[in-house]
Image: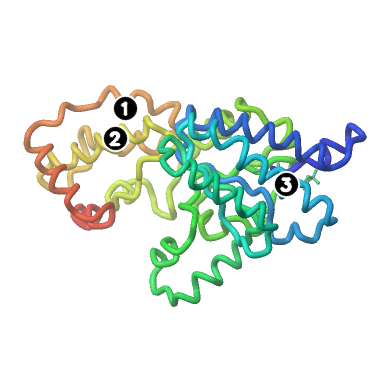
Amino acid sequence: MDGNGRWAQARGLPRLAGHRQGVEAICRIVRAAPGLAISDLSLYAFSSDNWRRPPEECAGILAMIAEFATEDAPELVAQGVRLSFVGRRDRLPRMVAAAMLGAEVATVTGRRMHLRVAVDYSSRESLLEAAHARPRTCEDIDRSLACPSVDLLVRTGGEQRLSDFLLWECAYAELVFVSKLWPDFAAADLASAVAEFQARSRRFGAVPAWLLRLGLLQPLRACPEEADIVSVRIVEMGMLPAPRHLGGRLGEFCAALHQPLAERREVRRLKVQPHAAGLQRLAALKEMDGDRSRASTFMP
Ligand code: FPP
């Protein structure tokens, strides 16, 4: 959410006026995001390094966070949005921490989207904390962190850094940098960022055919069409006697899956009616514990 200060400065206003306008942008984006099939949205409101700012700016930002938590919670409930805060709470004014907790409790049943707001947050500190539990696998660390892995990271205001935000979670994030200042950021800008994300080819270090075999093409949260394709892919694979068949219709899926989404719409026409054997196979796969075991089933 960079650019609040510059937005205010350009108008001869105090920096806090820029942050106030930034809250308006937050409300716009939170309203628009579920419509773009975004199920998890994380905002970096106050980093642990932001304590280095003048005390009145820190106090002003924290007061806006408390106000947002108190006054906007009913609207979040109405929108089906769950609000959580990530970061340290022990250094926050008690009233601010209480307002944050109140909003978390009030919105806990929200299922349409999970909004996480990072306050007094440092990614390095959360990784350090995760290390105290002596993790042995990457999944152990995933489980101890408060945010899921990031598909798309958008940074406004022309900045091109991660600034200690979700360092682990962004391992395979697609990065989109926008020169617009945060107070001017609109729903259409978020939609453009999502469209840019959808046009990218994500390979997670593999090559496309192997992605398919390893089951690594997960349904993308921001992309319902992709989810369709993936579920069809599973049914389709279930109907095949062996994974070595990469020709025919499955070959077409495979080829289509690493085209930009815009060119991929055709693939939906390939959708097959799952027959009984396919459905049985799919049911068996669902009983296994997730993508990894599914992957080993299809290893050549
Ligand atoms: C970065 O821009 C912005 C911040 C450090 C604060 C963001 C806080 C809010 C928008 C208000 C409160 C948040 C919620 C969730 C209600 P900057 O100040 O560094 O701007 P600059 O890059 O122009 O200097």
What residue is drawn where x is 67% and y is 41%? Answer: 67
Tag 3: amino acid: Ala
- Ligand 1, seen in the image, is in the quarter at top right
Q: Secondary structure at mark 3?
A: helix
User: Up-down: is 126 above or below 271?
Assistant: below
Q: Secondary structure at mark 1?
A: helix
- Is the Cβ of the residue at disc 3 closer than 8 Å to that at disc 1? no
Q: Position of residue 188 (x, y in %)?
A: 61, 25
Position of residue 254 in the picture relative to residue 117 (left or right) = left
Q: Visible in this render: residue 300?
A: no
User: Up-down: is 159 above or below 296?
Assistant: above
User: Up-down: is 20 above or below 97?
Assistant: above
Q: Which residue is mark 2?
A: 253
Q: Position of residue 287 (x, y in %)?
A: 17, 51
Q: Nearer the viewer, residue 232 or 119?
A: 119
What residue is drawn where x is 68% and y is 56%? Answer: 47
Marks 3/1: CA distance?
50 Å
Q: Which residue is mark 1?
A: 267
**Which quarter shows the C terminus?**
bottom left
Point out the tag, 2 or 1, that comes first from the N-terminus. Answer: 2
Marks 2/3: CA distance?
51 Å
Q: Which residue is mark 3?
A: 63
- Is the Cβ of the residue at disc 2 closer than 8 Å to that at disc 1? yes
Q: Residues within 10 Å of mark 3 (few under 14, many from 20)?
A: some
Q: Nearer the viewer, residue 185 or 278?
A: 185
